[in-house]
Amino acid sequence: MRYIVFYNSLTREKEVFKPINSEEIGMYSCGPTVYNYAHIGNFRAYIFSDLLRRVLEDYGYNVKLIMNLTDVDDKTIKNSKANNISLNDYTQKYKDAFFEDIQTLGIKKASVNPAATDHIKEMIDIIELLKKNGHTYESDGSVYFKINTFPKYGELANLDKQELLDGASGRVLNDEYDKENASDFVLWKAYTEEDGDVCWDSPFGKGRPGWHIECSAMSCKYLGKHFDIHTGGVDNKFPHHENEIAQNEAAFNEKFVNYWLHCEHLIVDGEKMSKSKGNFYTLRDLLDKGLSPEAIRYSLINSHYRKQLNFTIEGIKQSQSAIDRVNDLIFRLQDINKTDSNEINENLLKELDTSNEKFSDSIYNDLNISEALGTLFTLVKSVNTSFESINTDTRDKILKFIERVNNIINCFKIGSTDKEENNADEEKINKMIEERTLAKKEKNYQKADEIRNELLSIGIEIMDTPQGVKWKRK
């Protein structure tokens, strides 16, 4: 039997995936802090999470994915005040933009996208449990987690124990901090004038939650105290995920998450992404350059998630070429109508079976996507070599394999071979093509070009071939 294997950041080893409940996998992915448009570094993490979910579904699991929206923290408050609008109005713009962007990139929407501001009660409840269990102290109206009361602190990030002991007496009030600050962190921040009208009442006084307690509360509410998988970018490993573990396990006295998966950093043109270097891109920036969402997605998905990804415009163009190669084959396959059987088809079917096996071996082995795509393109080459001999039965099996791959990759244009499904659209398209053909016969090339451009605007690409005009959906 074939198993799924993941590299678990907590144990720093590859492990066979064993779900808590095979009926449904509980998975939590850290979502955006909605203070600005998400950039491509963020989207690498979200597409990685999408890939992981799709692989689990390919294996046969149902996945309950929770991806939070951080709509209250230092940055959202600061920016809303700078724009002189309410926190809710400020963050709503970027929440809407996030959902538009993930739809554009073909990322499946989570089962639930909880917002932090809707879960303040749950956060207060966990803080009270931590207080009851002796893991907190209060100072100047703020509540802090005492890391020296949780012996496992630092295991996920593999922090030096002596370093932790040396820093344990310090306190960090900011939501985000670096590895040099392995210190007591804030659970509840006392109200200050800088917070404006962003505050809630609590047993500890007026204030607002720290960033880390937000994810603890939302994951617990929707997935329970103990669930299967937690994902995020490697930059979230410490302090955010380390603090989540401490909060949940100290509050509930049981294991929090079984498998921690982290994707590596994204760099651009070999350098860290920075606005000052001119290599900082949001999705909208890339679309404005005329790059397709599919090519952007492919560029963010086609290398292993645990390897640093060097993102380049040239790389996106190469991704588009790879996508076009598969799409062109799909288009040509859908025109095949031979029903005879021959030896070449039998050989191709054997290779297809092998391709399915190899694809599974790769994708279930810690999401080895580059090896899996290599299997796809080896098959594409074989299909193109023996194309003239392929019959409809073989065609359908090839398309089924490509569809399986695309259910995971989600970059290709594959549709049904039953053309009756889209008759209404096709009648309109064919009529426009007839009008263009007539315009060309009458040497009205301007009108012919206008019709071609109109077809392109609705996603239809036409090709003049010796057998007549062919068209395909872009």
Image (spheres, grey):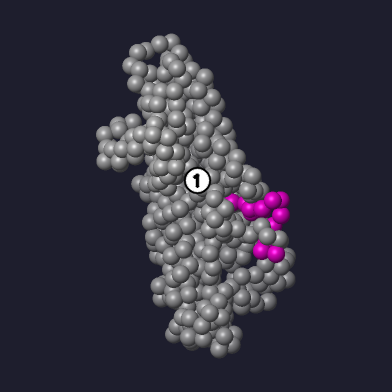
Q: Residue at x 66, y 57 (%)?
A: 279
Estimate the x, y position of residue 358 in percent, counting from the top left. Answer: 52, 29
Up/down of 171 relative to 28, above or below: below
Q: Quadrant of the N terminus?
A: top left
Up/down of 276 relative to 393, above or below: below
Say what secondary structure mark 1 lies in. helix
Q: Residues within 10 Å of mark 1 (few under 14, many from 20)?
A: many
Q: Is residue 105 magenta?
A: no
Q: Quadrant of the C terminus?
A: top left
Q: Which residue is mark 1?
A: 294
Estimate the x, y position of residue 157 in percent, counting from the top left. Answer: 64, 58
- Of 312 and 22, which appears nearest the observer? 312
Up/down of 254 relative to 403, above or below: below
Judged left or right of residue 446, residue 392 is left
Q: Which quadrant holds residue 239?
A: bottom right
- Whether residue 153 is visible to the viewer of this picture, yes or no, is no
- Whether residue 384 is visible to the viewer of this picture, yes or no, is yes
Q: Which quadrant holds residue 54?
A: top left
Residue type, mark 1 in image: Glu
What are the residue bounds of the magenta stretch?
A: 263-276
Up/down of 348 relative to 324, above or below: above
Q: Residue at x 67, y 67 (%)?
A: 178
- Of 175 and 303, which appears nearest the observer? 303
Estimate the x, y position of residue 175 in percent, counting from the top left. Answer: 59, 73
